[in-house]
Amino acid sequence: MAGRFEGKQALVLGVANKRSIAWAIARRLREEGAELAFTFQGERIEKGVRDLAESVGGHVVGECDVRSEDDLDRVFAATADAFGGGLDCLVHSVAFAAAEDLEGRFTDTPRDRFWMAVDISAYSLVAAARRAEPLLQARGGGSIVTMTYLGGVRAVPHYNVMGVAKATLDASVRYLAWDLGHSNIRVNAISAGPVRTLAARSIAGFTTMEEMFEQRAPLHRHMDADDCGAAAAYLLSSDAANVTGTTLYVDAGYHAMGM
Ligand code: NAD
Ligand code: 0WE
């Protein structure tokens, strides 16, 4: 497939390793011609992200813990430097809750870890979009995509505080779409079914959930990170020029079922 992103520049937040959904999105954008920039969280994954970035001729614009206003300021300044003051696409694929809060009862979530999950998984989109806005405006508009999950709309056992964070993220997509629409910037979410990534593998009962998913989804099959890559490329491209403020389900139809 040639060229939807020829001459376009994209910043990708949320690559941890080659299984990351963010990486599948980046690869697809690259295949279609985009120039890429990446951030990484923590020295532990720096080398891995640098190697992946290098394999697609991308820039690494620095370390970014999304809880840090300074980190965000620094990586958006570095992105402006690398990309000549503009940006076409922003990919946000970041989430975190304490492991212990994805096990027991939601009712027991302490205040500090509730806000941490919302801070990292939802407020970070707002903080990133605010900094991306002038860069996207410099190109006459652009597109932002984030990753969400059905657990923000319905109660999925054990997803717990992450579900509350995703509900916050989903609402943030709609309010950002309204604000940034004035600048021809679109904001959308992809709601993916279970994908075996670093964030998913450590979850107790993930295999059982995959089995249930395969039985109940209309298409009776798993999805993978590349499905998210294809959906993100659509939402980030001019093919979706009049699509904003919405959630695209990439889940083999699972969300449509009542049983
Ligand atoms: P992943 O572990 O590869 O990606 C999560 C990323 O979040 C990592 O790169 C990690 O470094 C980053 N991150 C966590 N805390 C951070 C912080 N404080 N600052 C900066 N970065 C931070 O896992 P993934 O499954 O690719 O997750 C990506 C997104 O997709 C998440 O928003 C997740 O909720 C969403 N999602 C995943 C699935 C699934 O089943 N894997 C399904 C639907 C949605
Ligand atoms: O958004 C997610 C997972 C995000 C995530 C994963 C972890 C594991 C490691 C956030 N924080 C952490 N913290 C850790 O310490 N998904 C959509 C995948 C997922 O996670 C679940 C799911 C599904 C699906 C947790 C419980 C139930 C279902």
Image: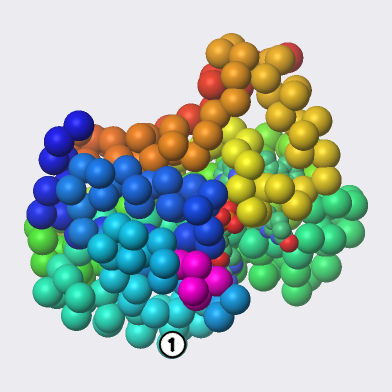
Does 222 sit above or below residue 259?
Answer: below
Q: Which residues are magenta?
A: 45-49
Residue 185 appears in the figure: no
* Quarter occupied by the N terminus: top left
Question: SS for tag 1?
Answer: helix
From the top left corner, tell me how far across and down residue 232 is, in percent: 36, 41
Q: Amino acid at mark 1?
A: Asp
Q: Residue at x 28, y 65 (%)?
A: 58
Does 188 sit above or below residue 259?
Answer: below
Q: Is residue 199 magenta?
A: no
Q: Residue at x 67, y 70 (%)?
A: 116
Depth check: 63 or 147 in front? 63
From the top left corner, tell me how far across and down residue 102 is, in percent: 79, 53
Residue picked out by circle 1: 70
The secondary structure making up most of the magenta span is helix
Q: Residues within 10 Å of mark 1 (few under 14, many from 20)?
A: few
Q: Quadrant of ligand 1?
A: bottom right
- Assess mark 1: CB under 8 A from ligand 1? no
Left/right placement of residue 133 relative to residue 21 reads left
Q: Looking at this view, name the residue that lies furthest to the bottom.
A: 70
Q: Residue at x 75, y 64 (%)?
A: 98
Q: Residue at x 54, y 29 (%)?
A: 223
Depth check: 151 or 32 in front? 32
From the top left corner, tell me how far across and down residue 20 is, in percent: 52, 52
From the top left corner, tell me how far across and down residue 199 is, in percent: 65, 53
Residue 78 appears in the figure: yes
Depth check: 25 or 53 in front? 53
